[in-house]
Amino acid sequence: VAKQQGRNRFNYFAPFMQEASQMRIELANELRNALKNKELRLLFQPIRNLATDKIDMAEALIRWEHPQRGLLKPAEFIGVAENTGVIASIGEWVFQEAAALAASFGNGFKVCVNKSAWQFRHEAVGVEHWLELLHEQALSPHSMVIEVTEGLLLEANREVVQRVQSLRDANLQISLDDFGHGYSSLNFLKRFQIDFLKLDTSFSDNQLLCEAIVSMAHKLGIKVIAEKIETPGQLEILMAAGCDFGQGFLFGAPISAEKLHRLLITQ
Ligand code: C2E
Ligand code: MG
Ligand code: MG
Ligand code: MG
């Protein structure tokens, strides 16, 4: 009877559960070869300096051109990459590609790279390795901005704090992504010295709140990048609040390195 019940239970859950885990296993296997097969793409979204109206930064955003499933967004594979550890080599590739782009623009231009809490926890290579890569390209560490989220606080043991600090000591820049989305953004500011915070348009319906956040950031020596700006109305409010940089579909979607070059030549 027990066996039969067990089987019934299994049958009840089986169809979708099995399919989902089957797909994850397939994705995990394919992801192992994605780098080697050159299926990963790094797109760059322009970030506009709102004071000068010039694009002097860009955020690197990863895509996977899957041979069967088409173009995949990070939400569809970063989790798998973390669970399998493949994220380590992907992270290395992302940093190299991003640094190469920064080098092609020369010092003064900044490229932002996203790094998950998982990467900070598990990364085997130290900051010296990143610095070496930058040195090879004759690139100032100031050219690279590492975007982290407050999820890092969950891991904020001594080692992680030190790792963030060592990046900063080496003059790489730190940016707090998705500011205000969770509950611990202020704790994050208490714990880590950062250079940028990214504020998205979920705040742009509240001018006073935007102003307060920007003024707090500026007092702490932090520059504010408003992200996901889609409409002129949002831009107006975020500019009035004193945001330093703007990013979003209003200015341009993520594009290839070649397209970004063409865009910057004409500005
Ligand atoms: P994020 O760092 O907050 O990146 C911003 C996301 O908003 C990107 O989604 C971007 O394409 C999208 N976006 C840009 N402008 C607009 C806009 O005007 N409106 C709206 N609604 N969305 C906009 P994407 O490329 O799908 O990336 C999602 C997340 O995946 C990123 O969020 C980041 O946390 C993560 N991610 C991306 N690339 C990497 C990577 O190389 N490594 C790691 N670890 N994570 C990455
Ligand atoms: Mg980001
Ligand atoms: Mg994010
Ligand atoms: Mg964000």
Image (cartoon, helix red, strand yellow):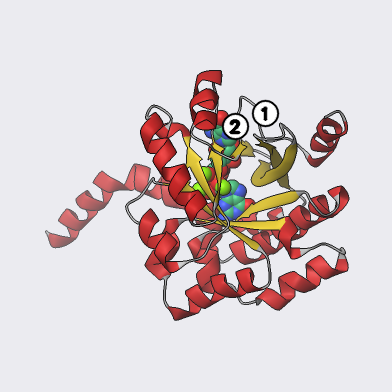
Q: Nearer the viewer, residue 107 or 249?
A: 107
The image shows residue 57 at horizontal and vertical percentages of: 71, 44
In this rendering, does residue 173 appear at all? yes
Q: Nearer the viewer, residue 50 or 44?
A: 50
Residue 219 lies, with reference to residue 46, above or below; the image says below
Q: Is residue 41 left or right of residue 31?
A: right
Q: Nearer the viewer, residue 174 or 256?
A: 174
Q: Please tell me whether mark 1 sits on a helix, a strand or a loop.
A: loop
The image shows residue 255 at horizontal and vertical percentages of: 73, 35
Q: Is residue 182 left or right of residue 114?
A: left
Q: Which residue does the numbered mark 1 point to in the structure image? A: 252
Quarter containing the C terminus: top right
Q: Which residue does the numbered mark 2 point to in the structure image? A: 248
Q: Amino acid at mark 2?
A: Gly
The image shows residue 38 at horizontal and vertical percentages of: 77, 51
Q: Is residue 233 left or right of residue 249?
A: left
Quarter containing the N terminus: bottom left
Asked whether mark 2 lies closer than 8 Å to ligand 1, one says yes
Q: Amino acid at mark 1?
A: Gly
Residue found farthest to the bottom: 158
Residue 260 lies, with reference to residue 57, above or below; the image says above
Q: Nearer the viewer, residue 137 or 12?
A: 137
Q: Is residue 154 left or right of residue 83?
A: left
